[in-house]
Image (cartoon, coloured by chain):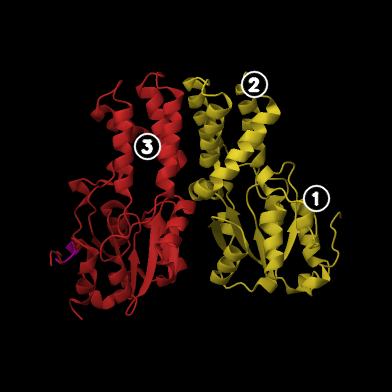
Chain colours: A yellow, B red
Amino acid sequence: MSADTASLNPDQGRSFDPMLIRTVGFDADDTLWHSETFFAVTEDRFRALLAPWCSEEEVSERLLTRERDNLRVFGYGIKGFTLSMIETAIAASNGAIPVGAIQEIVEWGKEMLAHPVELLDGVEFVVGELEQKYRLVLLTKGDLFHQESKIAESGLADRFDAVEVMAEKDEVSYRRVLSRLEIDPATFFMVGNSVRSDVLPILNIGGQAAHIPYAITWGHEQTTSEDQTLEFPVLSSIREVPALLSARD
Amino acid sequence: MSADTASLNPDQGRSFDPMLIRTVGFDADDTLWHSETFFAVTEDRFRALLAPWCSEEEVSERLLTRERDNLRVFGYGIKGFTLSMIETAIAASNGAIPVGAIQEIVEWGKEMLAHPVELLDGVEFVVGELEQKYRLVLLTKGDLFHQESKIAESGLADRFDAVEVMAEKDEVSYRRVLSRLEIDPATFFMVGNSVRSDVLPILNIGGQAAHIPYAITWGHEQTTSEDQTLEFPVLSSIREVPALLSARD
């Protein structure tokens, strides 16, 4: 097992203790099912579309900048991503992009939204194992309509005691959601693919969390080493969660 | 008072009885604050933009058709509306719309998303009155991020015991939300501007509801007389709600 189960930073005053855990929270995109892969495929097509005007690096950089600027008004999700691609295409081509290419970008967004849900390896098995011993909740971020569609399609909805789509995953919103679900953070363990959204805020409110990196991380979710003063288990697969939780049973 | 407090259809087996009510639910857009007005203003600009290619009537018809087709993938909200305007502009102009006009449409979407919240007349007073006697909940539909932004900006968030952003407002989703909030539908009273989304599904699950029409109703929310076999109070202003609820106190 590749889990690093070292103690948390002593500043936290606690060490990782699976005995306390009563509820396990799962992130959804890139934790239970593939998501970033589809963004990456679309971004490849987008770079090719803009090749007459921009280098691949410049397209990616402009798109990420635009997405970040737009987060404040659009929030997370594919519709905002699609609108950011449209704006980037117009700006990066100095308005020379043909209008037919804009329609193509809208079609890509629709394809992404309609893409079948593909569960990651081990998810069904692990959820089946854990639901016998823990209360399970799904805490995801992004577009409400698309997240609910994917949750329904995943076939996993009934396995979770609660499903919460959050507009943002920070300490304030986690505190609010856990309080609403009557979950004491000290008894809560979260797993997800984003250190920034799934791990650090949970540690900071007194919960436990493990990081399961996905093959690709969106630029906006990337953390720098400065963020990493806290220690936490890093797993190579969701299949390692049950063993981690029973390590000190 | 213009409220029509006639009994419900006998098939329902109940009449309107304010004595039962413990929780009052409010819709948000066009019930607590203005929304459709901003869509209408944008649609006016959109019709003007497409005037070289299409009559105003044709633009509106094409846009509504496109929005309805896209609801299945986009859900409700301004980002989907913006993408539908872009698609309609390209199709209705046979691809002749300049790419600068597409950027203009994206800007309109951002303006709508960033528009300050404007409470409807009487909302603060009525919420203040009712919170003394009832549990208040806010049940809104649409884009999670935008709805949460507006709720925060409205200054009303603390007045509601629960705030739920729903992907759809039908009987199934209302049943789920009320069950989660431990509200017996028989003790629940909902007010909103949409007969289709705020009134009929609540009556159909055994709750009470009143309709407060807004000046404008989006085509998709319009109901036909066939839907109207149930009777319910129709109010001309939210200011009439406290009197309606205390009518038989």
Q: CA distance from mark 1 to mark 2?
A: 36 Å
Asked if the residues shown at circle 1 and circle 2 are in contact, with their CB atoms under 8 angstroms apart, the answer is: no
Mark 3 = which residue?
Answer: B67
Q: Is residue B8 magenta?
A: yes
Q: Of the residues shown, which amino acid type is indicated by label 1?
A: Ser
- Determine which residue is flagged by label 2: A51
Q: Is residue B30 above or below residue B244?
A: above
Dot 1 or dot 2, earlier in sequence: 2
Of residues B105 and A197, the one drawn nearer to the viewer in this rendering: B105
Residue B62 coordinates in the image, percent (x, y): 32, 30
Of badges 1 and 3, the one in the foreground is 3
Query: Quarter of the image holding residue B235?
Result: bottom left
Dot 2 amino acid type: Ala
Q: Which residues are magenta?
A: B6-10
Tell me which amino acid carries mark 3: Glu
- Residue A204 at x, y = what percent? 70, 67
Left or right of residue B196, residue A31 in this image: right
* Quadrant of the image occupied by residue B32: bottom left
